[in-house]
Amino acid sequence: MTSSRPLRVFFCLASVLVLSCSADQPPAETDGFQPSRLIADGMVIQRDLPVPLWGWADPGTDVEVQFDEQSFSGRADAEGRWQVTLPARPAGGPHLLRIRAEDFQREIHDVMVGDVWLCSGQSNMEWPVAQARDAEAEIAVATDRSIRHFAVPRSSSLKPEDRLVGGEWTVASPETVGGWTAVGYFFARELRKEVDVPIGLIHSSWGGSRIEPWMSATALGFRDDEQAAREVARQLEDEESQLLAKIREQLGELPEHDLGMSGSKAVWADPDLDDGNWDEMELPGRWEGAGWTGLDGVVWFRYRFALSADELKALRANGKPARVGLGMIDDTDTAWLNGRQIGGLERSYDVPRVYPIPIEDLREGDNVIAVRVTDTGLGGGIYGPPEMLFLELDGHRRSLASEWRFRIGSFSYDPSTNANQFPTLLYNQMIHPILDYPVRGVLWYQGESNAGPEDAYPYRLRFPGLIQDWRRRYGLDDLPFLFVQLANFMKPAEQPGESDWAVLRESQSQTLELPQTAQAVIIDIGDADDVHPRNKQDVGLRLSLAARHLVYGEESLVWSGPTYREHRIEQDRVVLTFDHVGGGLLAKDGELEQFAIAGADRRFVWAKAWIEGDRVIVRSEAVPEPIAVRYAWSNNPEGANLYNVEGLPASPFRTDSFPTAAALPERP
């Protein structure tokens, strides 16, 4: 494959300025009369606000919209866009909507009037109900027809687009909910217990996305959309050029077709293949961590294990099932044992692979497990906790967390798969086309991809900038914006220290200075080994508490855990006071943990902390003259246990303004 080929494809696409639309998405709107894809059966429209309905037609086409026997009319302008605005209506439904224009007529059935929430962010917002905690039980009881969901397909563009590339409304049921955003669904379900109106969720997220792709050109400081398009196109070209040069340096010739396959035959799964000249890679682990940054395509892994004649005889005699665990695989895999396929999943980067092994396929001497991994963008490989890689024979497990042979079968590059890393591209195609559709508020779960040393501090400017820009474009200065603070993740720190994730959380918390914002703290439900907590129920619950207080007028509701207010130093101890103490402060499951204290040398040590009324007292014999306290200041503040009695966790904080890295200034 030559380096110019993807760019020729890219710039051909750039002529229409749409970068990605996967093959399994519905086709984009075509010429002729077309309503927006949001105007469809099962739709939810926002109560108590005028609601524009729009679409496209030949210029000058007269359009009539009938809603419950009331008629409204409009005409397509010179650009072919028509719009009819329905007057504000109270919650209710179902309603019937009719659209007529010349020889076009359509009835839109089962229209509900209620509250519409936009759900956006990266993979933890994208995470489906089917992979949440207790998924089977949750799906079985998902029968509230007043909860609806519209999924905006992953798509991107160099300039703001008016039309969505696909999407449809679905109604909550055991047949549909499994693929919905879990955070959004559990939020809506909890909200429905207290707010008796239909809830519509417009879900527009993309796993692994940075915040900049969700921001408009002007919000990022570009002069206009044209300047942004030129700059982003240049960035994409530079990215490809640098990536291909690096991969060529490592790999040499770039195979376009999988060398491990000959037609439909998996030649690299052959147990008798000589793989002695293959490279080795420690698994589990994504291959980017092994020096193969930017590698997309097909990579093969092989692992040999030996069985003696006696072991094989015993296995065949007892008849116990055997299986192999291959961790989680990003994105698609096929697995073989001794040349026979034993399993495989497509586009399931977050699903643990456990495949049965036919005992009759085991043999005396060497046995070979072969795994073909296909990655289409960002991280790739076999990853997860080491215990996920195992061989289970005769009821006993042996670990497969070890060196595996690996070899690259093919290399591919598609700029659209990395659109979630480049400024404006997702805003242009996944947010801009829906801005005319009124919403009650926004749910946002993003930040993991900006939690690096160069990004965590500037996020406190980026995130408020996004909120203010979206509000301006929706025409609502007070549009409620509810967001999720990063969960606890990675190995807990043994000693207090610096943390990019803690800085990112602080940046999120500082965004609360904007009015009509609220934060759900979830440092108590994360997973050290997985950036995707399965407990999306509590995330949705805590967001719903914030909405009930901020949006639905439950002023006395305790909706947040304790947040740091101020401190004072009393000789050798620091006294902390808090907002949102609710019915009182609580040390959950024992003495308070995750408090650190420092003196003038700025060296933090673990401290003893205890509750006195609505205050927390912190001290350490090692710091007789303290000047600062930090709480839960780490990637994974495991054991952080300051709550209010209502059961909501305190938000991480620091009382100091010390620079977190040499390049960062002290806070004013």
Image (tube, rainbow, N blue to C red):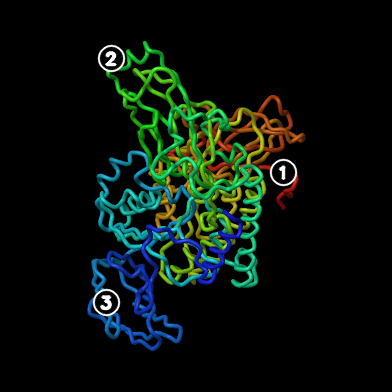
Q: Say left or right for 432 vs 98.
A: right
Badge 1 amino acid: Ala
Of callouts 1 and 3, which one flags the residue occurring earlier in the amino acid sequence?
Answer: 3
Q: Quadrant of residue 463?
A: bottom right
Occupied quadrant, residue 289? top right
Q: Is residue 164 at least partly visible in the picture?
A: yes
Q: CA distance from mark 1 to mark 3?
A: 59 Å
Amino acid at the residue labelled 3: Phe
* Residue plotted at (41% across, 63% down): 440
- Determine whether label 1 and label 2 are within 8 Å by CB: no
Residue depth check, mark 1 versus mark 2: number of the one nearer the observer: 2
Q: Which residue is mark 2?
A: 317
Q: Which disc, if any, is residue 661?
A: 1
> As rendered, which of 362 and 493 lies closer to the eye?
362
Query: Residue 282: percent from the left, percent from the top?
Result: 56, 30
The CA distance from mark 2 to mark 3 is: 72 Å
What is the number of the mark on residue 67? 3
Residue 71 higher or lower than 638, as above or below: below
Ranked by sequence position, the earlier of labels 1 and 2 is: 2
